């Protein structure tokens, strides 16, 4: 099911016409579907029925408080990578004891705040971090719950910028060294070992690397058992791919079933950190054609959204589908590059797309619900787009467009 469908020749989000959203909230504008977010999250929990589990949505994919709140109401846990994400989750009604804290660069202040609110665990990414965490916890007179993020050295076969489980990547601790690090963790006064964590990359279309990684992690768990180190949870990270173009995306249920089948007799809580698979196809980015520039060799459609709004095409050469909200039956069919107003040659959202368009036409960049708004910036002093959530036939502004005043807040000139 996709929440974005043509009804009477016009693209809708559920039963709401996208043109009416653009009229009300302006363009560019992100639009998300509540029903789709709920459906994708529930696919995880349904596939985990009968198995102890905790699904920690990866906040970095889309951190709008309304999105987090929709998931928190379904009992979601959250995977965070900064104190900023921590405060967002708490503000959205997420439970501290369902939060895992990932990331290679946690500061002492971030550790303190996470210990103060009582998160589920820290996913420790280096030996130095383990020592610092023990020190912070000692100073506070508490014990810090941890899992070690291991790097299993498997090739996720995804874009090199979003592959994280290879020896060359900065993430996690080499799985071969992990027993030593667990031994050290067990000896530290203010550390409590909870689990093993592993996240090998993002946008995986083939799930076999996940299973290879799992086999290595399970063998580590068995080794740890012989060292009298008991693991109560196994966190397999996020990374499940989605359809942007013609990929055959893995089914959540089948992926989880394959993992459960490999667990054997081991009694552990299974944890996941999905981001993209929950939010990507829950959202579109609405944008309007400002100008058509027809050159001898190339046609450009200059649109009002830019790389500062959605950086995936510029950064990863990601292909994202661009749809006309009200496709025209008449007019010239041309091939265009869809570029934004930012002063960078790399500022494009789509290249070589054939469409029948005119100035003022509304377009929708599909699959924009993940790593869209969260990666946006104010480059060229552009205010970030509004965000809207459709809930059945209702539509709510969940973040106002940034104004120029918002952009200048806190800046000061020298006396
Ligand atoms: C540690 C960690 N967990 C979870 C995720 C979420 O990944 P995805 O959005 O691919 O599900 C990421 C991002 O790749 C990550 O780095
Ligand atoms: N931002 C990336 C995914 C990064 C995953 C974060 N570890 C993307 O848009 O595909």
Image (cartoon, rainbow, N blue to C red):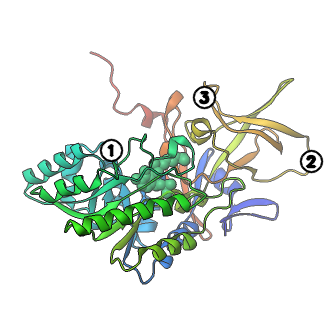
Q: In this view, does 52 lie above or below 374?
A: below
* CA separation in Å, label 1 and label 2: 53 Å
Q: Name the residue under label 2.
A: 330
Query: Which residue is at the far top?
Result: 415
Q: For residue 233, what is the image quadrant?
A: bottom left
Instruction: Give the label on residue 342, or none.
Output: 3
x then y, percent, for residue 167: 41, 44
Q: Do the residues labelled 1 and 2 touch (CB within 8 Å)?
A: no
Tag in front: 3 or 1: 1
Residue at the image position 56 percent from the left and 62 percent from the top:
207
The tag earlier along the polypeptide, 2 or 3, is 2
The tag earlier along the polypeptide, 3 or 1, is 1
In the picture, measured across the screen, residue 350 lies left or right of residue 256, that is: right
x then y, percent, for residue 173: 32, 48
**Res. 281 in view:** yes
Q: Tally the numbered discs.
A: 3
Residue at the image position 14 percent from the left and 60 percent from the top:
143
Residue at the image position 42 percent from the left and 84 percent from the top:
50
Q: Mark 1 points at which residue?
A: 104
Tag in front: 2 or 3: 3
* CA separation in Å, label 3 and label 1: 32 Å
Quadrant in which the C terminus is drawn: top left
């Amino acid at each position: 099911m996709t929440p974005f469908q043509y009804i009477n020749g016009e693209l809708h989000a559920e039963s709401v016409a996208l043109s009416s959203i653009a009229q009300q909230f302006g363009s560019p504008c992100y639009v998300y579907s509540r029903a789709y977010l709920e459906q994708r999250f529930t696919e995880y929990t349904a596939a985990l029925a009968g198995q102890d589990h905790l699904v920690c949505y990866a906040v970095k994919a889309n951190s709008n408080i309304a999105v987090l709140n929709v998931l928190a109401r379904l009992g979601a846990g959250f995977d965070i990578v900064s104190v900023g994400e921590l405060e967002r989750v708490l503000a959205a009604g997420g439970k501290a004891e369902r939060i895992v804290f990932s990331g290679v660069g946690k500061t002492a202040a971030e550790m303190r705040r996470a210990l103060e609110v009582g998160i589920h665990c820290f996913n420790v990414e280096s030996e130095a971090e383990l020592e610092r965490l023990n020190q912070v916890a000692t100073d506070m007179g508490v014990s810090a719950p941890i899992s070690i993020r291991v790097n299993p050295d498997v090739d996720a076969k995804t874009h090199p910028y979003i592959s994280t489980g290879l020896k060359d990547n900065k993430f996690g601790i080499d799985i071969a060294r992990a027993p030593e690090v667990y031994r050290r963790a067990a000896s530290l006064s203010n550390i409590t070992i909870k689990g093993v964590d592993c996240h090998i990359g993002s946008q995986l279309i083939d799930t076999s690397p996940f299973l290879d990684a799992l086999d290595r992690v399970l063998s580590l768990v068995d080794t740890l058992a012989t060292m009298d180190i008991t693991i109560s949870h196994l966190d397999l990270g996020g990374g499940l791919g989605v359809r942007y173009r013609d990929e055959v995306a893995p089914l959540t249920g089948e992926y989880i079933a394959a993992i459960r089948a490999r667990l054997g007799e081991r009694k552990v809580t299974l944890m996941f950190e999905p981001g993209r698979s929950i939010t990507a196809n829950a959202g579109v980015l609405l944008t309007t054609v400002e100008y058509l520039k027809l050159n001898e060799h190339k046609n450009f459609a200059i649109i009002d959204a830019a790389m500062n709004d959605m950086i995936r095409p510029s950064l990863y050469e990601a292909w994202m589908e661009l749809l006309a909200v009200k496709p025209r039956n008449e007019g010239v069919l041309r091939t265009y590059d869809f570029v934004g107003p930012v002063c960078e040659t790399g500022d494009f959202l789509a290249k070589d797309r054939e469409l029948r368009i005119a100035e003022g036409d509304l377009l929708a960049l599909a699959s924009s619900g993940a790593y869209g708004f969260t990666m946006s910036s104010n480059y060229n002093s552009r205010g970030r787009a509004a965000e809207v959530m459709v809930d059945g036939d209702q539509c709510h502004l969940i973040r106002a467009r940034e104004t120029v005043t918002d952009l200048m807040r806190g800046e000061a000139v020298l006396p």
